[in-house]
Amino acid sequence: MYSTCISCYRPLGTNQIIDAFPIGRRLAFDPAKGRLWVICPRCTRWNLVPIEERWEAVEACERHFRRAPRQIATDNIGLVALPEGLDLIRIGAPARPEFAAWRYGRVFARRHRRLVVAAGLSVAGGTALLLPTLAPQLLVILPAVYLTVTQSRRYKDRLVARLPASDGVVLTVQRKHVGSAHIETGSRNGGWMLHVTHAQGEQHFFGEEAIRPLGHLLAFVNGTGGNRGEVLDAVRAIEEVGNPVAYLETIATRHEGSTKLEDISPVDRLALEMATQEEVERRAMEDDLAGLEQEWREAEEIAAIADNLLLPASVTSWVRSHRKG
Ligand SMILES: [Zn+2]
């Protein structure tokens, strides 16, 4: 096992995550081809790990990668930064279905549970106090009380999001504005747009620039989350279309004309929120991923040669002596 970079001879560092391979702070792996590289923190050279040290380590990398809560991916390459200080770069098509179901399952199920527990507590509390005196009426009164609270002014003025518009102005969106937020098709350039009413007036967001504000609003509209079945359906819906942006367009065109966010089906709304989140993250990491992808293509060429040509010892020693000269 080596611990210095073959290009700059600096230490590659260590990690405490991959037991089978505790070298490096940034590991790149290709589960399909069984390749593993340590990326030099100093010169960014991809150091190919010898074949006999790879298999267990690649398996461990894949396991940690799939379990990581925040995964960023293009069609060819994925990146996670583990909190312990190890970056994993995965070569190959993203493992979205299991990953997304896991990631969003936790987020949405937590929201869902909170709602169920809250409702359960208020009903149980109310029942314990009032049931002895007015049992049947209770079922009528409780929803009425709830409605009164939700209609109250303070509730309606609650801040939902602050959305930066293209001209630098920050728009304040309150609860009372969410109901009228809608997506429209057949607008400028034949694309889709998001229409938002806010404290200062109204705003249209077109196509790409609508993704971030749409995500903010959906996080609020989807406030009750979803159960595991709904989350899986939502993940599948994005999978069928292929990628998050295409999915946004599909939903927009499916609801031809004008559709309020609150009128979109719960599964479609969950899927839309996931799609917007993934797209926002992908954009933030785009440069990093593009650089990594380029580095990988170069490293892959070398790896292919190293793995496929098992040169006789006489040739390698000849190469070595000439390199020194
Ligand atoms: Zn180096």
Image (cartoon, rainbow, N blue to C red):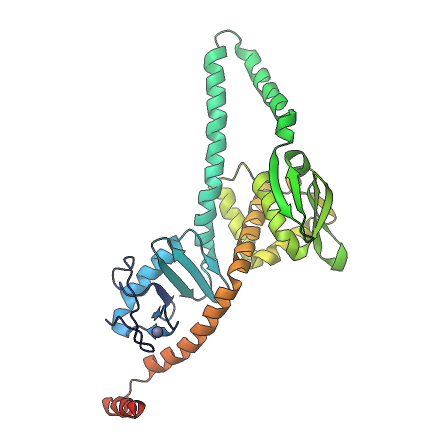
Residue 40 horizontal side relative to residue 173, left or right: left
Q: Nearer the viewer, residue 241 or 222?
A: 222
How many numbered marks appear? 0
Judge whether 65 appears above or below 36 on screen: above
Percent across and percent down for residue 112 are 49, 36
Residue 281 visible to the viewer: yes
Q: Nearer the viewer, residue 80 or 60?
A: 80
The residue at the point 60 percent across, 41 percent down is 161
Residue 250 visible to the viewer: no
Q: Residue furthest top?
A: 133
Judge whether 226 appears above or below 140 on screen: below
Percent across and percent down for residue 155 are 61, 28
Locate the C terminus by quadrant: bottom left
Locate the N terminus by quadrant: bottom left
Q: Nearer the viewer, residue 4 or 61?
A: 4
Percent across and percent down for residue 221 are 60, 39
Judge whether 27 appears above or below 63 on screen: below
The residue at the point 52 percent across, 11 percent down is 135
Give the quadrant of ligand 1.
Answer: bottom left
Percent across and percent down for residue 204 are 72, 49
